[in-house]
Image (tube, grey):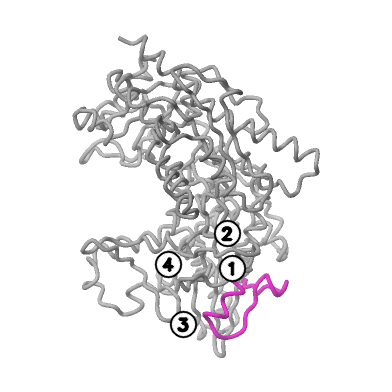
Amino acid sequence: MSITKTKFLNYSRCPRYVGLCDLKKDKLDSVVTYEDYKLEELEEELSSFLGLMYEGDNDLIDKKNEHLEVMLPYYNQVELLAGNLAPNYFDGTFKFSGNTRNQESFDFKRNGIRYISYVDIYNETKDAFRIIEVKATTSNKFLKLGTKVNKKFQSIFQKKADGIYYLLEDLNLPIENMMDVEIYEKQKEKLTDRFSNVGKYVYDLAVQRYMIERDLEAQEKETMKPKIKYYLAVLNHRYCYTGGEFGDYPTDENGEDIVTFFDMTSVTKKMQEGLSDDFDRVEKSIQEFTVNEYPIGTYCEYQKTSKCKMIPVCWDHIPKKNSIFQYLDKHYGFGEGKEKRTVYELANAGYTHMLDVPDKLLTREKNRIQKEVVKTENPYVDIEKMREAIKKITYPIYHLDFETFPCPLPRYEKEYCYTQSVFQFSLHIEKEEGVCDKEKDHVEYLAPDHLDHRLDLVKALCDAIDTSSGTILVYNASFEKTRLKELADIYPDYREKLLKMRDMIFDLMDVIKTNHKLYLELGFPEERAKLFNYYHKDMCGSFSIKKILPLFSKLTYQGMEIGNGIDALVTYANFPKYQEKEYAHKYQKLLEYCKQDTWAMVEILWGLREFIKEEK
């Protein structure tokens, strides 16, 4: 039997995974080619891409093959960029996917199982070698591990003159003079948590190291082990693209390269003992071949794009609606003191539905309200807060929505990695209360291709919005505010008007959820200002526009060819591939989808106004 690194990462989630995979024990001598290996690795890496592009959007975690395929060129390009840049930072010779199909691989046999791992970048030196794993995440995830000291942020990593980042301890720096040592250690622990947003990459590299060291032991080259260095190559969040041909990323004006390197040699070394236990557990799972129930936990990676494929089986006892996992702030746990329990502890003890959780464990008022709403089937309403918030919306109202392409690699001048590059907007203009026609009062713009049309979009937006009065209404204001600020920084001629638009924004979500600062300004007491204004049992712990729309309108996205943000992204990404007739069709469908987004806001606002009038 052959197990690749990618398979091992999944098999080691929990003892049940192997049995549920219906693994065939008669494949003990199967051979894994480089092509097989890359195919297995591909879906995992592309899933990670989507996770980075839409972090925090739980409505978009169910990926489809076409969603993954559209990201493939960028995934391949990141590996090539890292391989081409590596010689600028390291000496020796290099093997990577850009210059050879003969990838360096390592394998070893243990208890009749062959473990195999291919290396993204193999860097051979005079007496040893370096292993460089390429990940399409950004350096910011690692550099923000740290704390503020005297109002200045201090990371646990620091860049040396060689341009590579190292842990402070690996540079023999006096950590106690730079930050609290206890905080340093606590932040560093995130690197060894395989299910954290940084630890998953380090764990991957640590598994790679384990396989390499076992291979060397089998070849009686154990003396080489201390000489090998292990690195992660990630996208540089500080890199600002100066423009040019896509794929050509010269050093930017601040001396930053698009890929940066982190030395993880010491961290992965400390993880080796624990990894030996992980390999033992995987082999035990294969021998026992059990599908017996196993407690659910963080290793399931529920509501992440990297979620376990077996969730439909292992989580079938968890209700789809109003489960314990839909309690707000569940990550803080339930209860206090000795009674405190995690959400997984309660779920594994049989408390799977909101109504199962004992009242004494619901110490947060918002959770007590959620339970009462589900129990009585009566919505919770703070009508006074909603009424006062609605008064802040002045006419004309510009209902605005952007569609963006968060490309891992910057495409246009002054963009960064994963910049949410705006390619479309929809605008419904409501001149006075209740007066807005879906077609006649609508303005839209959609880039016709992948050339840089941002300036055309900005001009169209500025022509459509009169900033002398009124409100720009959005749903989830931080997104549109950030996009307007980015566009203002790129186009100084339109900066003043774009920043004025930013100041005109009002978040429709604030009427339903809350906005602590807003409601304090409106005169509400602290605790009331923090608490949501409206909650319905059908919201299931979410305030997303897709959950709110059916509560205040009969409008639906059902039957639409493009029905969510990922579908919109994929359609736009595929523009260059479409033939003329299909392109015209897809272009129109994308316009219809974005129009539906802003019309949804119009109908929600109308529904809210009627609801408030009816409530006493």
Mark sitting on residue 409:
2
Q: Which residue lies furthest to the bottom in this view?
A: 126
The quadrant where residue 369 appears: top left
- The answer to whether residue 426 is visible is yes
Q: Mark 3 points at which residue?
A: 226
Residue at screen point 56% across, 25% down: 441
The residue mark sitting in front, 1 or 2, is: 1
Q: What element carries label 4?
A: loop
Mark sitting on residue 562:
none
Is 38 magenta? The answer is no
Point out residue 225 in the picture as x, y percentages from the top left corner: 50, 81
Point out residue 493 in the picture as x, y percentages from the top left corner: 48, 52
Asked if residue 373 lies left or right of residue 254, the reply is left
Crowding near the residue tagged with mark 2, few <14, some 14–19, many ≥20 C-alpha atoms within 10 Å: many
Q: What stretch is highlighted in magenta?
A: 82-107
Q: Which amino acid does label 1 sit on?
A: Tyr
In the picture shown, does residue 340 fall above or below 259? Answer: above
Q: In which quarter of the image is the C terminus?
A: top left
